[in-house]
Amino acid sequence: MNPSELPSLSQAPSERHAPIPGWILGLGVILSFWAGGYLFFYSGGFRGDVYDAGQITWGPVSTGPVAPPDPKVIGKRLYTANCAQCHQATGLGQAGVYPPLAESEWVTGSKNRLIAILHKGIAGVIHVKGNVYNNNMPAWGDGAPVPLKDDQIAAILTYIRSDWGNNASPIQTDEVAAKRKALASMTNPWTEAGLLAIPDDSATPPPTTKSPAATPSTPTPPSKK
Ligand code: HEC
């Protein structure tokens, strides 16, 4: 081999470390600040519940008075996400499969029974507005695949009691919480008989199955909101 083809020894790599150019250091500092700021504003505090409607508690803070979130607005959002696939956005359900919530005696009647239904679900025959359904409704409380929290259930129920012509009183978070505790040991879904055994705390009890002639009554003159 011709020695002139060998790499020149005079260009052997040096051991000395070249200093990092200042502009790269500067860029690094700027990027770090930007990334830190981005995380601060958009991390949501690394909280899993940050996307829960009405609970935006992180991010740039507005100084003006903040209106408390309207449970009906939140309830509608949660209803759309969790319930509408079966009961439909119209609240009318699907004939023979999913019972209606609009003008349902279970929805506008006893709070105790309605809250119980949400916590544990229903299995088997149930009568709604004079029609028979024999299906299953999943539980939404403890034991559900994705359990809803007390304030979420309260918001949904407040919403479904007030839309589609329904005009029943709102449901409070502590009412839902109390029922969650009371039903903690219950593992099976409700049956209609079980639900009817819960003391009715409404003025207009759901018609029993023996009075199919009962029509949705309108005892109070419609009070417009
Ligand atoms: C997978 C479909 C499905 C979903 C999702 C669902 N339900 Fe139901 N729901 C049913 C079925 C089916 C019944 C009747 C159960 C039976 O036949 O035993 C029912 C019954 C009910 C009843 C009592 C009967 C009536 O019509 O008034 C209420 C109240 C109710 N659901 C509310 C809700 C709410 C609120 C949600 C959302 C958190 C929800 N459901 C989500 C299927 C569903």
Image (cartoon, grey):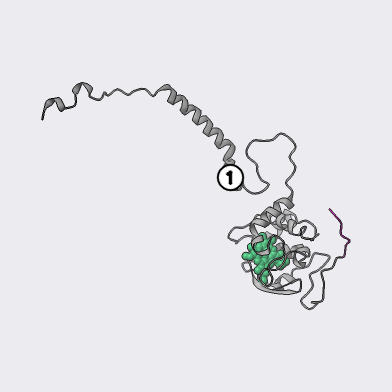
Q: Residue 147: within the magenta?
A: no
Classify mark 1: residues with Cα within 10 Å, few (<14), some (14-19) or many (20+). few
Q: Position of residue 198 (x, y in %)?
A: 74, 68
Three-letter residue code for mark 1: Arg
> Which residue is located at x 64 percent, y 58 percent?
82
Q: Position of residue 140 (x, y in %)?
A: 64, 61
Residue 153 visible: yes
* 55 on left or right of 4: right
Q: Quadrant of residue 59?
A: top right
Task: State the SS at label 1.
Answer: loop
Q: Which residue is mark 1?
A: 47
Q: Main secondary structure of the magenta part?
A: loop
> Which residue is located at x 25 percent, y 25 percent?
13
In the image, 126 versus 191, the foreground residue is: 126
Q: Quadrant of residue 218?
A: bottom right
| 176 vs 192: above or below | above
Residue 181 visible: no
Q: Quadrant of ligand 1?
A: bottom right
Q: Which residues are magenta?
A: 219-225
In the image, 133 versus 68, the foreground residue is: 133
Number of marks in the image? 1
| 44 vs 91: above or below | above
> Which residue is located at x 23 percent, y 23 percent?
11
Q: Residue furthest right?
A: 221
Q: Quadrant of residue 220?
A: bottom right
Quadrant occupied by the N terminus: top left
* 197 on left or right of 27: right
Q: Position of residue 145 (x, y in %)?
A: 58, 60
Q: Position of residue 219 (x, y in %)?
A: 87, 65
Tell me if the residue at label 1 has its CB under 8 Å from ligand 1. Answer: no
